[in-house]
Amino acid sequence: MDILRVKYLVSNITYEGIYRKDTLEYPEDALREAVINAVIHRSYMGAHTQLKISPGRLSLWNNGGLHPCIGIDDLKRWHKSKPRNEFLADVFFKAGMIEAWGRGTIKIVDECKKAGLPEPEFKEEFGGFSVTFRNERVGEKLGDRLGDRLGETEKKILTLIKSDSFMSIPAIARTIDVSTTAVENNLKKLKDKGIIKRIGSPRKGYWLVIS
């Protein structure tokens, strides 16, 4: 949650009296519940849990599908809890991170509704399970804020590094079908405009969107 808050997500800053209040672009309780579910229900014999973030969209994918007796529609109402990793589930429950069995996905939906956001999308795909949050207001704000400041290639690169801050220059070039030199030139433009900056070394660092 700290990594999401500090590195990836936008916070809306308000004040209550003299106290500052940071509100994430997606409900924190819903995100926390999704992360906890990912740890408890993941199949640890396969791929690692994967997170993808782009303007107005956040997806969390986990290896391993739903239990055969639970369908997608069941996730929006009370259902029997069928944790894949019972020992992990028991630890989280005793630590107070699980309030009630079979209500985690309901809480995710309810928190999004309370925040005025669309219901998250639950889906079985690629041999696993994903939950996708959407916040159209964030995507619109990013476009409005940048306006005509960016060329088409800059916009494509910005979208890519927003979704994967560790993406390499060759990978960016392959994805948008341009030369590595063109990517380097456009990254320099984005840095000069104060929109992004490089954190760490060229080989092991990552891109931070700051505007």
Image: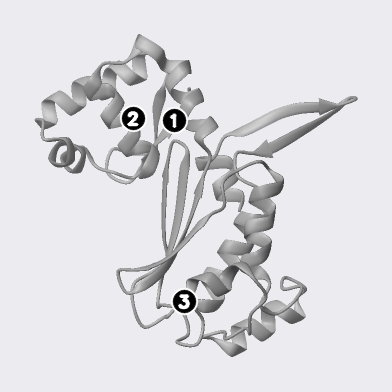
Q: Secondary structure at mark 1?
A: strand
Dot 1 corresponds to which residue? 209
Q: Secondary structure at mark 2?
A: helix
For residue 116, side relative to residue 74 (left or right):
right
Q: Earlier in the sequence, mark 2 or mark 3?
A: 3
Structural distance between the alpha carbons of marks 1 and 3: 30 Å
Dot 3 corresponds to which residue? 42
Q: Earlier in the sequence, mark 1 or mark 2?
A: 2
Residue under the image location 63 percent in, 85 percent down: 80
Residue under the image location 68 percent in, 82 percent down: 91
Residue 144 appearing in the image: yes
Give, as a three-letter code, the residue at label 1: Val
Disc 1: CA contacts within 10 A as few (<14), some (14-19) or many (>=20)? some
Q: Earlier in the sequence, mark 1 or mark 3?
A: 3
Q: Where is residue 144 drawn, in percent x and y?
A: 46, 17
Residue most extreme to the right: 17
Q: Is residue 64 above or below residue 49?
A: below
Q: Where is residue 41 drawn, in percent x and y?
A: 51, 78
Residue under the image location 57 percent in, 86 percent down: 82
Dot 2 corresponds to which residue? 158
Q: Secondary structure at mark 3?
A: loop
Structural distance between the alpha carbons of marks 1 and 2: 8 Å
Q: Is residue 188 above or below residue 8?
A: above
Give, as a three-letter code, the residue at label 3: Arg
